[in-house]
Amino acid sequence: MAATGDAAYIKQINRSLILQTIIEEKMISRADLSKLTALTRATISVQAADLLDDELVVETQLEHHSVGRRPIMLSINREAGFALGIDLDYGAMTFALSDLLGKLISLETVPLESMDYDDIIQTAAQQIARFQEQASSSRYGLVSVVVGVHGLVTLKEEVHFVPRFGWNNIRLKEDLERAAGLSITIENNANLCSLAERVFEHHDAKNLLGASLSSGIGLGIMMNESFFKGEDGFAGEPGHMIIVPNGKPCSCGNKGCWEQYGSESAFYHELAEKKGRDRVNHDDVRNWLQEEDKTVIEMIDSFIFYLSVGLNNMINLYNPAVVVLNSELLRIYPEAVARIEENLVSNISHYKHLHVSNLGKQACVLGACALGIKQFFQIPTLQLEAE
Amino acid sequence: MAATGDAAYIKQINRSLILQTIIEEKMISRADLSKLTALTRATISVQAADLLDDELVVETQLEHHSVGRRPIMLSINREAGFALGIDLDYGAMTFALSDLLGKLISLETVPLESMDYDDIIQTAAQQIARFQEQASSSRYGLVSVVVGVHGLVTLKEEVHFVPRFGWNNIRLKEDLERAAGLSITIENNANLCSLAERVFEHHDAKNLLGASLSSGIGLGIMMNESFFKGEDGFAGEPGHMIIVPNGKPCSCGNKGCWEQYGSESAFYHELAEKKGRDRVNHDDVRNWLQEEDKTVIEMIDSFIFYLSVGLNNMINLYNPAVVVLNSELLRIYPEAVARIEENLVSNISHYKHLHVSNLGKQACVLGACALGIKQFFQIPTLQLEAE
DNA sequence: AATTTTTGTTTGTTCACTAAACTAACCATT
DNA sequence: AATGGTTAGTTTAGTGAACAAACAAAAATT
């Protein structure tokens, strides 16, 4: 059983604390680390020596214009290793390589021609090998590979269900690890998006919801610096929350699910019907909006009403500090946030801020890199600059 | 800043682990503790000596019928102190005194004649003093006083809002601590109910939802052995989840909130209307059910439909292992669970078990005692026998 | 040049753990 | 009764990481 405590455990705790403080402060002396962490200067010196030895931090001499001995500044050796984040989306895989402070080194999107599982594994493995080669000259090489999957992922990182690919209970982790020859982390894409918002954008939000609106509605829940996953890892499926009893039928077996009313594809689908078209896309909507097309504005208002109903429910259930909506549609509708907030009037709902994401489609890969960095440093919280 | 590690911290971690193991195993030797905790026998001996010294555990010699030296069994000194749990409900306060293993020593309900805040504080303080006297001969006396409040409680234990009492931003903790002269913990009643279910009933459910249906719908969320509270402490207010857009108006300012459809009082209210009565109560419904009254059965079915809609939503958002419904109404309708489960058919919803609570109205005070015991022993998880 | 101030290192102590040897107590067999 | 085997619990020596305090280094101020 047992997670017992011993000296090594203490040292690990304090090492994490020190690393985390260095990342937050960007550049800091041993003396200041001692003040911030409440560890003695002696302890800091020993730990700093270990970190220097491991090449995880570097020393810098700055000029100094106050009394006392000049401090030796410590900062993260950001190129000691690299993190690879992968967004395994329908139709395309996106790869992001970042340094240890989350700065993007390269960002590439590879279209997925084949839907065949083995082909996808092969393509991914080839790309991973390429990035591994690119990172190989650094001290630690590729420190992590994290794959974002647009579906249900269990606590054991098994892929339980991915609607667009038609995958059921796939052992993606094992298959990809075998093909690529290194350890891989599988995570739900909405979780990665919410982590990205937390790490790169909302440094004050300890409790954050990230909702991705596209074909369905994905929800990433960051509470107290960690993902909220529930018993199996399936927490946060708000798309199948019933908001209209006996409403539109849904593929899940129920009627009136939120994603039949509040997802972007529901919006496009209904708009196409109203416009008597086969399909409409993002650019059509943008043009209609510039022309102040009445039908479109009415439909957006209706969309926002149903969106707000679901948001109201999530806010009541999770009490987040910040809610981030990742939606291409809302990005082109400047009043979106104001319009939604007009609907969030209950005196029970408590949240601090509602935003439309700035990270957009990069959120998933950025979150994947961030997760890899967190794991590598073994730190519970991470705050980085997007550049 | 900083929660740093040092030797004392290690010792505390291992002490908690040992105490928790003794509670789980009820009676265990040092040698077996060593096996279960992976600490060496030497370490266990030192810690056991401390615990004996603190009178938190006692030694027992049992007869023994196998080879080798006879073990000295350790078990919790259950009467070293007592926990007091208080349910501050509208109209009545319930007090439960338990030993350190959660066995009820006394259970008393005091009607609240006055609604005046100061009178309530006075009454509570007097009762607390009585129980403190009762516990005073033990080594630690009253080790904790936990008050369950039927409303929103912040992370700092401020009472933000209690509908039935009309309280807003009340400093109940401070006022009661001053009047009673000891430290007091304030907690939301639904949280305490869910803790009680976890501690006394569902020992395998790491992730549990406890929903209390009465005048409103309260939700206690136990995830990974701790309360899920959100940014302010207000997470889990499903009563104000909108399940009927533009539905019945609610006091919260929205329309179509779940508690207008799925709470017991909504049910009674609507039934009274249908029956052309001023009001109906629990016994009326029980009688009608025995007579197989058609109106009542129809109405229960409708109630269960709306109840299921909300449960479906909570299950999708939290992915719990176990959902416990605390409802007097459902207790007298034996098919309740089966009927609800007929509605939970989505292939996205994941939960393991749905139950109607056995603890009923005692859940809150039992959970309050359990919380006090957890705090006193400083252990993250607790499993006790209800007797 | 001497003084003050701050940074970082060195030395010695404390504390909780482990490992291994030891003592204690019991059963089984001869 | 004596011996051997087995399990329970204690003692002792050693390790690692923290802390405290003294010390050394380096800069600005006087």
Image (cartoon, coloured by chain):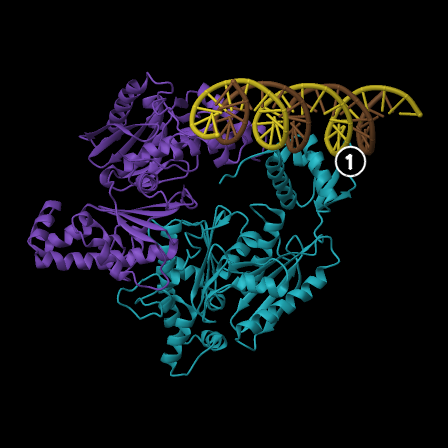
Chain colours: A purple, B cyan, C brown, D yellow
Q: Residue at x 39, y 76 (%)?
A: B269
Query: Where does the image place residue A80, in percent across and percent down from the top left?
Result: 36, 22
The image quarter containing residue B301 is bottom left
- What is the crowding at mark 1: few (fewer than 14 residues within 10 Å), some, or many (at least 20)? few
Is B77 on the left or on the right of A134, as rendered?
right
Query: Where does the image place residue A372, in percent across and percent down from the top left?
Result: 36, 31
Q: Residue at x 42, y 57 (%)?
A: B234
Q: Residue at x 25, y 52 (%)?
A: A259
- Is the C terminus of chain B in the top left, top right, bottom left or bottom right quadrant? bottom right
Is B3 on the left or on the right of B293, as rendered?
right
Position of residue A6 relative to residue B258, above or below, is: above
Q: Element type at marker 1?
A: loop
The amino acid type found where label 1 is placed reads: Arg
Query: Where does the image place residue A69, in percent across and percent down from the top left?
Result: 47, 25
Q: Chain of mark 1?
A: B
Write down the residue under mark 1: B70
The residue closer to the viewer here, A249 or B154, is B154
